[in-house]
Image: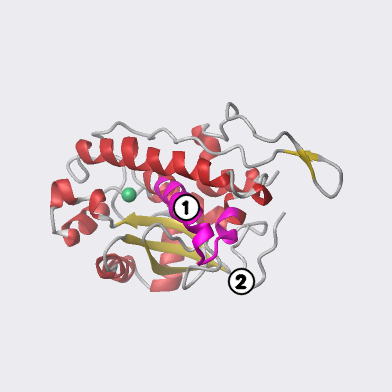
């Protein structure tokens, strides 16, 4: 099983939200090349619980937005992601990195792309925010930002600009690739783990959702104010943990186009 990497990557192990054991398989177990039994398709993922109360990020992110965003939007992505996985028996025991790498810019991958991305992106998003967040980055975050951007101010300006520049719905990211931090963005629910879709591949360590559903109730059309206030809730300790696992020697990096191999 390659779940270990995903657990490490997303910090799910700490939250105790592992693969849902109650989902049933259709078609019975299959045998892989080595003769070992494996399930007919991926057992799926659970909606992770929020690591804080719905109103914990007030006044920067309001409780009503959180309730809809987690309870409706993320729950919907989770359900549809698990449905979509049933069409990909080759992903039966794939890690999240492998699942994302499997996605192509073709119609048959659309549900997996939109809902798998939606599942992964929001899981990361909840974790990198905290009511005790904000302020200047510390630890591995401070070091990586200094190394790649010279100063936190410079990083913050570039990240905010990237987030403000996303046309329509999407995400801005800080990612690690080959040990280096970089800023990028993706449309819709794409993310930089999607080997054959993302402009620049990397392991996301920080991300901001700039879909209108993430801020419109409170900020209406003032996306810039939402982005500025997001910096008041960034959980730099968690970002540092992501950077540490993404720069570890055994980190599972997304593969280059044309080199995607399945487990
Ligand atoms: Mn969202």
Q: Earlier in the sequence, mark 1 or mark 2?
A: 1
| Crowd tier of the residue under label 2, counting other residues whose Cα lies within 10 Å: few below 14, some 14–19, many 20 or above | few
Reading the image, the residue beneath label 1 is 111
Q: Callout 2: helix, strand or loop?
A: loop
Task: Give the quarter of the figure containing the N terminus.
Answer: top right
Q: Position of residue 208 (x, y in %)?
A: 33, 56
Is residue 67 among the parts visible in the rendering? yes
* Colour approach in the figure: secondary structure
Q: Is residue 17 above or below residue 188?
A: above
Say what secondary structure mark 1 lies in: helix
Q: What residue sits right under mark 2 in the picture? A: 256
Residue 8 covered by magenta stretch: no
**Which contiguous range is marked in magenta?**
99-122
Name above or below for residue 144 compared with residue 97.
Answer: below
Residue at 27% x, 38% y is 68
Q: Position of residue 170 (x, y in %)?
A: 33, 61
Q: Is residue 33 above or below residue 64?
A: below
Instruction: Check if residue 109 falls in the magenta segment.
Output: yes
Q: Is residue 11 visible?
A: no
Q: Nearer the viewer, residue 51 or 67?
A: 67
Looking at the image, do the residues carrying marks 1 and 2 touch, with CB atoms under 8 Å apart? no
In space, the residues marked 1 and 2 are separated at their CA atoms by 22 Å
Residue 258 position within the rendered picture, expressed as x and y whole percent measured from the top left: 64, 73
Give x and y (percent) for residue 150: 38, 73
Q: Examine the residues drawn in magenta and state their main secondary structure.
A: helix
Looking at the image, residue 133 sits to the left or right of residue 226; the answer is right
Q: Quadrant of the C terminus?
A: bottom right
């Amino acid at each position: 099983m390659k779940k270990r990497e995903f657990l490490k990557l997303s910090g799910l192990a700490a939250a105790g939200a592992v693969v849902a054991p109650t989902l049933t398989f259709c078609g019975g177990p299959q045998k892989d090349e080595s003769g070992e039994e494996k399930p007919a398709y991926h057992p799926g993922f659970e909606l992770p619980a929020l690591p804080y109360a719905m109103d914990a990020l007030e006044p920067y992110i309001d409780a009503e937005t959180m309730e809809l965003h987690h309870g409706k939007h993320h729950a919907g992505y989770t359900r549809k992601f698990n449905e979509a996985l049933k069409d990909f028996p080759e992903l039966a025991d794939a890690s999240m990195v492998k699942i994302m790498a499997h996605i192509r810019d073709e119609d048959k991958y659309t549900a997996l792309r939109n809902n798998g991305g939606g599942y992964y992106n929001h899981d990361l998003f909840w974790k990198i925010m905290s009511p005790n967040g904000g302020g200047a980055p510390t630890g591995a975050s401070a070091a990586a930002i200094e190394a790649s951007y010279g100063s936190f101010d410079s990083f913050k300006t570039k990240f905010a600009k990237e987030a403000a520049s996303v046309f329509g719905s999407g995400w801005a990211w800080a990612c690690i690739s080959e040990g280096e931090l970089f800023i990028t963005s993706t449309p819709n629910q794409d993310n930089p783990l999607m080997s054959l879709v993302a402009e620049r591949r990397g392991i996301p360590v920080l991300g901001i959702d700039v879909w209108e559903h993430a801020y419109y109730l409170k900020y209406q059309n003032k996306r810039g104010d939402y982005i500025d206030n997001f910096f008041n809730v960034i959980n730099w300790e968690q970002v540092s943990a992501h950077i540490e696992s993404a720069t570890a020697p055994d980190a599972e990096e997304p593969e280059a186009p044309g080199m995607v191999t399945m487990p």
